Image (tube, rainbow, N blue to C red):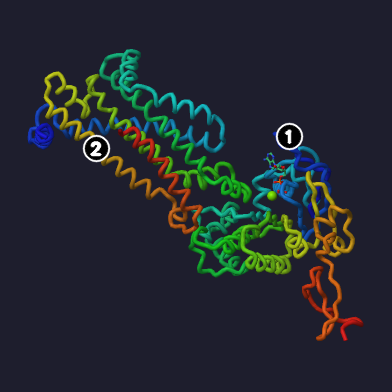
Amino acid sequence: MNFLIEAVQWLFSPERLEGSNPIPLRLEEHLFYTFFSVIVAALIAIPLGFYIGHTGKGRDFAVGLSGAARALPSFGLILLLVLLIGVTQVQLQLAAITAFVLLAIPSILAGAYAGIEAVDRRVIDAARAVGMTEWQILWKVEVPLGLPLLIGGLRAATLQVVATATLAAYVGLGGLGIYIFRGLPLQRYDEMLGSALLIAALALVLDGIFALIQQFAVPRGVSAGRAKDVRTSSTRRRAVAAKPAQERRG
Amino acid sequence: MIEFRAVTKRFPDGTVAVEDFNLVIPSRKITVFVGSSGSGKTTLLRMINRMVDPTDGDIEIDGDSIMSKEPVALRRSIGYVMQNSGLLPHFKVIDNVTTVPMLNGVPKKQAREQALELLDTVGLSRSIADRYPSQLSGGQQQRVGVARGLAANPNILLMDEPFGAVDPIVRAELQQETIRLQHELDKTIVFVTHDIDEAFLLGDQVVILEKGAKIAQVGSPNEIMAAPASDFVANFIGTDRGKRALTLKKTEAGTILVDSEGRGAGVLVGGSESA
Ligand SMILES: Nc1ncnc2c1ncn2[C@@H]1O[C@H](COP(=O)(O)OP(=O)(O)O)[C@@H](O)[C@H]1O
Ligand SMILES: [Mg+2]
């Protein structure tokens, strides 16, 4: 209990806004790593996921890739990339961000293609039968209906990166992990625990925001419907999307 | 006029769904494909709008091969109504109906105005225009499906078991409306069902299909009932079980027609027996 009180005291001490490691600065770095990596990963994974979901091609590849990538040890990946890329400041940043991007891709890829796969085949068939082009089917039917699952993938990826971004400090890149890696050799438990609490809180806040976005992403007509089949499919989708996030948070 | 010429469809897995199929479908009439599940009805229908391409043979619409037409443009020019409506769940009723006209570049305002009129045509209240499909009954969804099929004012309307999933009372209503619509709008309708009574009720031309879309008999309902071409047809339409046989029965109140189980089916009017 003492640890906890000291951690909270550390966290809310006015000193946290001063000196060379003010929390707002480190928080900003942490969020930058998180969002930048997730955005880059999304730019790669979403088009690929849409392609796989729409055409059904390369699905086995995507499943295999996600499975393999989930087994990647993030710490080892960063160190490996640092070895490969180099140790100047820019190279370190490149290595860390590359690692975060690689970690974020599988969840987003899975969300993107699973979202499209989950759309009722009969709806897609009808869209094609009335004369929509493949492009129109993708953007007017598959993407809107698959959006909740895609957001679920982004949510899972963000949570994973926000936790992993702690490791940026290990290679001298700042972020909220800096307090942990600084406190560790000095056995400053208040500092380590306090910053860990902050990272956990950040993860919860981001998760909450994504949960909200996910709610809003369920198209009207799918959420407002009273027809049973529509309603169950949409809640099932949300549950599936949330699951990986919870697994990884633990 | 739609003409099938020696059409064969073999799916990649080797299933031959349609084999050497020949048929002329007259314009401005209802032609019904009827047969049991798996006989190839849906495959036949979907070959007309190139949702499925034949492996062999050719299909012509008014003398032009559809193989020379761009599939998307062809589909936009042909109405399509399917079982369980196939409506887009995230589009309001009105937006479902205007889908095809909007794809064809009709201005939004005009498309909406026409869509509202179409709701009248298919017997729906305009007040449901802003609802989502999931907020409608099965029968209402099918009507919206028909309205969508008619929205681009196509000459041809393809209907694949459109009333298969609605309850019998609503189905009877929708069947009557289909006949009324056909009389009003003069479309060439190709209708698929596994229900022979529905086929006889709706069809000007009825095509009874066996497995592989082999034609067991084609003709008007009267021709088929009067002279089933084979045991298969007699069995399919039920005449071999006396299903359609009506006999005269004298009762105290007068002479009536009864079916094979002795239930009253009607009275005979005109002719010598009526008095
Ligand atoms: N895409 C497909 N791939 C393989 N076989 C198919 C496909 N579509 C239909 N079939 C097969 O072709 C036959 C006819 O199917 P279908 O036209 O759907 O029959 P119906 O509409 O009369 O029930 C069936 O044996 C069915 O399994
Ligand atoms: Mg069928």
The outermost residue toward the left is A14
- Examine the rendered structure and indicate whether residue B143 appears above or below residue A207: below
Query: Residue A125: horizontal and vertical position, in percent?
Result: 60, 46
- Residue corresponding to mark 1: B14
Q: Quadrant of residue A84?
A: top left
Residue at point 56%, 49% (across, down): A123
Q: Label 1's element?
A: loop
- Examine the rendered structure and indicate whether residue A89 appears above or below residue B8: above
Report the front residue among B55 and B273.
B273
Evaluate whether residue B40 shows in this view: yes
Report the front residue among B243 and B121.
B243
- Residue corresponding to mark 2: A202
Specify the quadrant that holds the C terminus of chain A: top left
Q: Quadrant of residue B13?
A: top right
Give, as a three-letter code, the residue at label 1: Gly
Evaluate whether residue A16 shows in this view: no
